[in-house]
Amino acid sequence: DAEITQSPRHKITETGRQVTLACHQTWNHNNMFWYRQDLGHGLRLIHYSYGVQDTNKGEVSDGYSVSRSNTEDLPLTLESAASSQTSVYFCASSDGTSGSLRETQYFGPGTRLLVL
Amino acid sequence: AQKITQTQPGMFVQEKEAVTLDCTYDTSDQSYGLFWYKQPSSGEMIFLIYQGSYDEQNATEGRYSLNFQKARKSANLVISASQLGDSAMYFCAMREGDNNNDMRFGAGTRLTVKP
């Protein structure tokens, strides 16, 4: 069955370190997204991609970067981790071919990141 | 400005009763879509139901229905015959017509079903 996976599921790091969170989907979806979830804010969009070599900034992109070298993967990098980036990170994907508003995003299981 | 507002941080409902979770939205687009997701304690996000701005009928999916009041810009989720497994966080989200890959989420409502 097609799926979307994230790794690691839990990560503890120190401030100033570079951290990369992996996202892999086997849906063959064009669109991929990274969100962070914080109490009281719901999910906020960090970066997204409409296809290979395409990346775009979302609502809260400062301090994060992504690259899309193939259809299946969109790794999220925290260049220099800060305590404010302690959060739960969700990756999502959607088909991206229909252009329909109805198009559903499918979410990965999430990664809990703690920056000390 | 907040695009999606969920005013109920927490709700309680007795098992087998119906419950309504509120969601209001803000958009100037005529074409938009509204979504509800469920997040159980295990953390995954599960898509529940969708309502398009041009849909004439309120969406229904099993025990879930969406009370869509376009003039009031509200899209409340109604869960009928609540079950213990319905205890979870519920998020309302919107996708607008001119940026139709960008979804905005509300802060969520934590529903607890009491036996």
Image (cartoon, coloured by chain):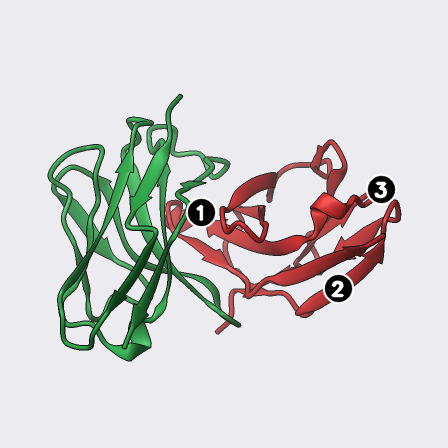
Chain colours: A green, B red
* A34 lies above or below A42: above
Image coordinates of residue B39 in percent, x first then y, are: 56, 51
Disc on res. B97: 1
Tell me if residue A7 can be seen: yes
Label ID, residue B81? 3
Q: Secondary structure at mark 2?
A: strand
Q: Position of residue A27 (x, y in %)?
A: 33, 27
The subunit letter for the residue under badge 3 reads: B
**What is the crowding at mark 1: few (fewer than 14 residues within 10 Å), some, or many (at least 20)?**
some
Q: Position of residue B52 (x, y in %)?
A: 59, 41
Give the number of the mark in front: 2 or 1.
Answer: 2
- Residue A115 numbered tag: none
Check if mark 3's residue and mark 2's residue have beta carbons within 8 Å. Answer: no
Residue type at tag 1: Gly
- Chain for mark 1? B
Q: Residue at x 88, y 48 (%)?
A: B17
Is A67 placed above or below A4 here? below
Q: Amino acid at mark 2?
A: Met
Give the spatial CA distance, label 3 vs label 2: 15 Å
Q: Hey, what amino acid is under mark 3?
A: Ala
Location of mark 2 (residue): B11
Q: Residue A90 or A52: which is nearer the viewer?
A: A90
In this view, the residue in front, A74 or A82, is A82
Disc 3 is placed on an element classified as loop
